[in-house]
Structures are given as C-alpha cells and as structure tokens.
Image (cartoon, grey):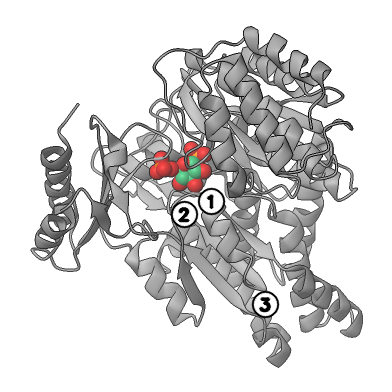
C-alpha cells in the first residue's frame, strides 16, 4: 500500500503537468506518440510507470526513451524498455493507457494506488530508470518531465543517459541488468569487436571494399555512425543527412520515406548511380538498403527492404549451420514476418527450408514469436528487425568452440555464429548493428548490392495511407490480413483483389499515426498501384474522409 507521503508526492508533481483537453492517448504500436506540445503530462506519467515497473522487478533498471522515430519532427513520443531490453510487457499497456488519460491528479493517484495493490508492488525501496532521447528539439523538455515522474515515486532514481538511438538504450538496459558493462562506449566496443571477429573469419576476401553511402534521416543514427566509423576498419562509409546541414528530421529522407515511396532521399542523385546506399529512420531502429539503377528515370530506387535483409541473414546463418553438419542442422532456425512481407521473400525463405510464422505489426509481437526458435530471425518489411539466439543454443555453440580444432571449418562456422549473436542487438532491432552485419556478410560472400538484390525478385507492391475521422473503426484479424470491421469492407476488398493476377491487399489502422494503412501487391507495378488506390477508395467510402 502507498504511504501518505508518497501520495502527496504524486499529487504535488502532477499539478505541474495537467492533461491537455480533448486528447485520447493510446500506447499503440510503439508507445505514446502525438504532437510534442501535447505530451508533457504523458511523459511525466510514463516516468511514474517506469519507476513502478522497476520496483515490480526487484529494482532492475528500466529504460524510458523519448522519440517519435519515423514521425515528423514536431511529433514526439515515449516508449519503455523492460529490464530484459525488450519492449514493455504488454500486460502493462492498459495501465499505461489509463494513467495517460486520467483527467485529474486525484484520479491519477487512485489509479496508481489500485494498481500498486493489485500488482503487489513494494513501493518502499525505490526503482531505477535510465532516460534517453533522440535529437528532436522537444526532447530535452520532455526528458525533464519524465525525470520528475520517475522521482515522484519516492526513492526512485532517474539517470539521464543523453542523446541515443532507441536500440542503444535497449542494449544498455539489457547489459546493465545482466551485470555487464553498460555504457554507450561499451555498446560501441561490442560492435567493433564482433564486427572485426567476423571480418577476420572471412575465408578469402573476394571484394574490394567499396564505399557505402548512408542517409542518416537527419537524426541521431547518422551522428552515432560518425562516432562508430572512427573505430572500424574494413568499412568505408560516407554519411549524409546528419541533421547538421539544415535538413529536417525524416523530411524527404530516412528509411520510412525510402521504403514507402521507393524514391531517392534528399541529398542523393544521379551521381550515386549503382552505389550501395542505406537509410536509417529517425531513432535508428530501422534499416533499409537501396541503389539507383543506371536505367533509373527520375528518382526511382531499387529497394532492399527488411525482407531482403532477413533473407541475407537467413542465408548466412543457414550456411554456417550446414558447415557444422548434422548437429548444426538440428538447430531450429525460424523466421517471423508480418502481413507486409513481400510474398516473394516468404517463398524464398520457405524454399531454403526455414519455418515461417506471421505476427501482427509491431516488433513487440514479432520478438515474442522469434523467441520460440533456437535462432529466430524477425524483420518487418520497413526494416525493423533482429536475430535472437536462445540461451541453450548459445551455450551449445560455446561448448562446440572447445570441441572443434581451432582453424577448422566447423570451428570457424561456430565462431561466426557466436560473433553474429554478439554483433546483432539481441534486445531489439538496431540499424547500426544490422548495417554492420549486412556489410560483413556482403564481404564474406563477395557480393555487390546488385548481386544481393538478385536473391529473389519482389512482387510489385504499393502502400498508401488514408486519413479518416476515426481509424479505430477498422478492426482486423490477429495477423491483420483481413478486416472484421467495418462490416462488409472485407468482401468489397476481396472483390477488388480478384481482378488482379497475384493480387493481395489488406488494411489496418496505424498504431503510430492517425491514418488507416493500405497495402497491395500484384504482378505488375501498375496493378499494385491501382489495387492500392481502389482499396483506399473503399476505406474512404466506408469510413468517410477527414
Ligand atoms: C513502429 C514500430 C514498428 C512498426 C511501425 C509502424 O516503428 O516499432 O514495429 O512497424 O511503428 O507501425 P504502424 O503501421 O502501426 O504505424 P517506429 O520505427 O516508428 O518505432
């Protein structure tokens, strides 16, 4: 139960952060997001929640990240990292929604009191929360609100860990709770060591190292890459859109833009034809690759999205398991995708003999499913994903490292897998670590970006968003492939799909923007465009346009 002094502390601090009128907030796909001017009270309250989460888990460190990722610069948001480094347990999301929307300090306190009792949280000890933010100008002010929230749970400590990518914070929180070194420089050191290890294990380096051109989305990721680059050899990166040259975060740049529009980001053009290029999103948890084909008319790019990255990773890991032989083949290697995955990528990984499962959009859903495998690779088409190694498989690998003679093929294959498990962020999808893994695999294979792209050919696809008065009117099945509401819309969508060869389409309400998303696939680009447009029309006629 909560003491009077504790209640008074929350009542007092919450007076500082009245809730703006007429906003209804929801934790959504990836935390709360809204125009930054509306968010102080929310972030303050998520600060309280984070302290409670820490207390619930024996004062383990919890992470609180201020970012709105791919959204526009005037938006901001807040997401919580659990002590494992994964997303906040979904069981706590309803409580997050309730307190974010509590209309008065009294209501807030009463919700907290009930929750603390129900969850049997021992509030006497004090928790620990690490606070990070991206480069958004509103970040600092919001971080102060979060600190006050954290500290209003008496005895709890708020540690400002500064400007970070979202995956850096998740990694640091995970490391801290495992009792490992957990500063930002430890993060960099870990990447550098495991990258070098993989480079040293390349049989014969078949490829001249060519320059990679990175689009930093005018956000935190490009800036961190500038630091990291300084410690790496065997990688030549030119970084554009760092945000220092006047460019605006995510505006005409970044992974979300490139993946959705399939056109070059600002700062790239005809002089880059054929070059290997990559884009991060605003908080560097997404990564896509692209190149400008020589026959490109206008600004079209050839996109290598999350599905292609997943396929490359799957191929490399499978190759190592094959080298290990019969024992390696017993490893359960699986893949997790969402409804957005290009049909051609799913066919490709299935042909490789991998198990494929589908999850709802949002890495929190994919991550859960990937944990079911010995090695689970998950990616959303938008470039958000990672590889998870189970504890038991990792200790098996480490054991094998002792069994096989050093320098043998099997020993090398095992060492590569161990290095991959260190390089790739086990907490959450991470553009920096994903990029390093792509780069080292390409060098290992001796492949150009064009060669990698030939793994399979994407079915043409199109995504559009539709603004509607109330996006929650769309309710989908658990894998989001069909709409249950509004009644009748799915039949109408099916009738459209039927008109196209290899037609596939679905709609879902976004969890990060106030729109309904439409995805369509068909055998030609023209057909995919036209299917997407007619489904968008259906959305407008069933839901009205705003
Ligand atoms: C977030 C989630 C992703 C999700 C994306 C889009 O990305 O972390 O898993 O795919 O939102 O979600 P929605 O379609 O619901 O708007 P980010 O990079 O913005 O954090």
Q: In which quarter of the image is the N terminus?
A: top right
**Alpha carbon separation for disc pair 3 and 1:** 26 Å
In the shown orientation, is residue 477 left or right of residue 359?
left
Residue 430 in view here = no
Q: Which residue is label 2 attached to?
A: 380
Secondary structure beneath label 2: loop
Viewer-closest of 294 and 79: 79
The relative height of residue 80 versus residue 102 in the rendered view (above or below) is below
The image quarter containing residue 93 is: top right
Residue 320: mark: 3
The answer as to whether callout 3 falls within 8 Å of ligand 1 is no
* Label 2, residues with CA under 10 Å away: few <14, some 14-19, many ≥20: many
Residue reaching furthest to the bottom:
326
Disc on the earlier residue, 1 or 2: 1
Is ligand 1 closer than 8 angstroms to the Cβ of mark 1?
A: yes
Q: As displayed, is residue 357 above or below residue 479? A: below
Q: In which quarter of the image is residue 334?
A: bottom right
Whether tag 2 and tag 3 are in contact, CB under 8 A, the answer is: no
User: Quadrant of the image for the C terminus?
Assistant: top left
On the image, the x and y values in percent for residue 536 come to 17, 43
């Amino acid at each position: 139960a909560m003491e009077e002094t504790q209640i008074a502390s929350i009542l007092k601090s919450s007076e500082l952060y009245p809730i703006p009128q007429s906003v209804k907030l929801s934790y959504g796909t990836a935390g709360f997001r809204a125009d930054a001017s509306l968010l102080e009270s929310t972030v303050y309250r998520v600060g309280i929640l984070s302290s409670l989460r820490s207390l619930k888990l024996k004062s383990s460190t919890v992470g609180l990240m201020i970012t709105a990722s791919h959204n526009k610069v005037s938006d901001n948001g807040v997401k919580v990292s659990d002590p494992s480094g994964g997303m906040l347990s979904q069981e706590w999301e309803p409580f997050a929604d309730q307190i974010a929307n509590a209309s008065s300090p009294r209501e807030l306190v009463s919700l907290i009191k009930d929750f603390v009792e129900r969850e049997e949280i021992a509030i006497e000890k004090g928790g620990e929360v690490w606070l990070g933010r991206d480069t958004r100008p509103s970040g600092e002010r919001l971080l102060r609100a979060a600190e006050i929230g954290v500290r209003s749970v008496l005895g709890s400590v708020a540690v400002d860990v500064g400007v970070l990518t979202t995956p850096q914070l998740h990694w640091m929180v995970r490391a801290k709770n495992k009792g490992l070194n957990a500063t930002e420089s430890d993060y960099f050191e870990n990447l550098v060591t495991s990258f070098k290890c993989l480079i040293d294990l390349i049989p014969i380096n078949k490829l001249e190292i060519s320059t990679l051109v990175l689009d930093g989305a005018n956000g935190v990721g490009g800036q961190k890459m500038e630091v990291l680059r300084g410690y790496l050899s065997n990688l030549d990166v030119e970084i554009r859109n760092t945000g220092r040259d006047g460019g605006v975060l995510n505006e005409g740049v970044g992974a979300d833009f490139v993946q959705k529009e399939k056109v070059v980001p600002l700062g790239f053009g005809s002089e880059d034809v054929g070059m290997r290029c990559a884009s991060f999103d605003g908080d560097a948890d997404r990564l896509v690759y692209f190149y400008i084909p020589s026959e490109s008319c206008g600004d079209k790019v050839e996109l290598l999205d999350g599905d292609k990255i997943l396929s490359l990773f799957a191929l490399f890991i499978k190759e190592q398991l094959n080298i290990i032989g019969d024992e390696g083949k017993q490893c359960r290697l699986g893949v997790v995708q969402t409804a957005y995955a290009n049909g051609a990528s799913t066919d490709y990984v299935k042909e490789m003999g991998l198990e494929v499962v589908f999850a709802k959009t949002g890495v929190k859903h994919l991550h859960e499913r990937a944990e079911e495998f010995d090695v689970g690779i998950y990616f959303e088409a938008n470039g958000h994903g990672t590889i998870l190694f189970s504890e038991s498989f990792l200790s098996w690998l480490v054991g094998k490292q002792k069994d096989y003679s050093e320098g043998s093929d099997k020993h090398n294959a095992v060492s590569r897998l161990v290095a991959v498990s260190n390089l790739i962020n086990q907490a959450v999808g991470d553009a920096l670590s994903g990029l390093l893994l792509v780069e080292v695999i390409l060098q290992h294979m001796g492949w150009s970006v064009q060669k990698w792209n030939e793994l399979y050919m994407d079915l043409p696809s199109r995504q559009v968003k539709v603004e509607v008065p109330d996006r929650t009117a769309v309710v989908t099945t658990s894998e989001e492939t069909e709409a249950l509401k509004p009644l009748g819309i799915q039949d109408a969508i099916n009738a459209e799909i039927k008109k196209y060869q290899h037609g596939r389409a679905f709609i879902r309400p976004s969890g990060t923007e106030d729109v309904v998303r439409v995805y369509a696939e068909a055998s030609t680009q023209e057909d995919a465009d036209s299917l997407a447009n007619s489904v968008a029309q259906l959305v407008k006629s069933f839901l009205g346009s705003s």
